[in-house]
Amino acid sequence: MKSSADTTRSFVGASQSEVDARRAITRLRNLLRSNALFSTITGVVAVVVAGPVAEVLGVDQVWVVRVLGGGLVAFAGLVFVVSGLRTSLLRPASLGVSIGDLGWVAGTLAAFALGWLSTSGVVVMGATGVVVLGLGLAQLRARAAAVRAIAGSDGDFDEVPPVEVVTFDRPAAVTPEQLWPVMIDHELYAKLALNLTAAKGLTPDGLGFQRSCTDTAGRSWSETCTLWEPGRRFDVDVDTGDYPYPLARMQGSWRVAPNGPKGSTVGMTFAFQPTPGLRGRCFVALMHLAFPPILKRIVRGWISAAATPTTGAR
């Protein structure tokens, strides 16, 4: 078993089957994180305002509500830990979480049948049960998809902490020849990425090129190009020695491909490995919330710039 990711390896440049497997595993991890967040919110509400909650549910014993709330918070902590386990442990542990979710649903139905809840309590617990059931079933489907994807790949997915992969692809009504110049415009990239204030090429574009990036807090780091396919794709590896975020590894891939006679598909792939410990795990969870709007903004900006006749080619 590996204790950490191979520092010389390109995860964004791996085979498509391995990238797809890591995406499937990452989806399972994100569902578990959503489960942990929902359980935390529900449990904290039950503990902090146990009296009003008990009244809504039609339960006479306030302490019962507090105990259930505390149990939910503890369950949330367990689920969050499971979401960051190495892949060989994630598969059986996530199954246990889904069984726990289905057990909650079964307990809710039993409370309905026994008449323990008021009408408003049935509504509240019914809505909660629907969310829990949805999460439990989604986790089971994601787990099955991850197992199939792993079986179809020869990659090694058991590093600690785990490497996660996020991809974003979008069709565009502009050609790759129009998109490529704006995709390698470092200054434009800094304007579009919400976490950056500057990006500057330090060496000529091409394999091995260096660029520096500065975030909104004024912290800088360097990136090195590890793959350069003019007009099609380039990959970078971030020097995490200077990185201001708790990541042990960060890689990015930017690509464009023809999609019809006058169109393209433009996309990005990011692979990242958190630093060991709670801070790294929490940061990765926040990354997954922040990434979608950032990536959508970047791609929309590229497409808009590529469609503008005044955009200069580099």
Image: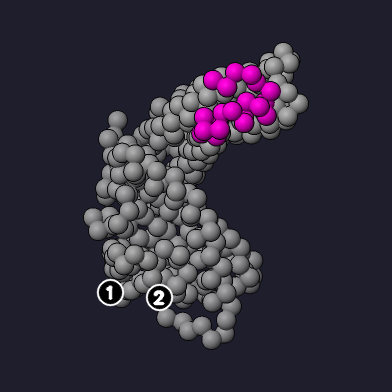
Q: Picture quarter containing residue 18? A: top left
Instruction: Tell which residue pokes out farthest to the bottom in this image.
Output: 310
What residue did someone put label 2 on? 187
Q: Nearer the viewer, residue 215 or 236?
A: 215
| Count of marks overlaid on the render | 2
Residue 101 disc label? none
Q: Position of residue 284 (x, y in %)?
A: 41, 46
Q: Position of residue 76 (x, y in %)?
A: 48, 31
Q: Picture quarter containing residue 127? A: top right
Q: Is residue 56 magenta?
A: yes
Q: Is residue 30 above or below residue 231?
A: above
Three-letter code, disc 2: Glu
Question: Circle 1 sits in a helix, a strand or a loop, which is it?
Answer: loop
Which region shows up in magenta? 43-63
**Residue located 50% across and 60% down the image:** 295
What residue did someone put label 1 on? 203
Q: Is residue 199 above or below residue 2?
A: below
Neighbor class of circle 1 (other Cα within 10 Å; few <14, some 14-19, many 20+) is few
**Residue located 57% across and 22% down the image:** 62
Prevailing secondary structure class for the magenta stretch in the rendered image: helix
Q: Position of residue 300 (x, y in %)?
A: 56, 68
Q: Position of residue 50 (x, y in %)?
A: 56, 28
**Residue located 70% across and 27% down the image:** 121
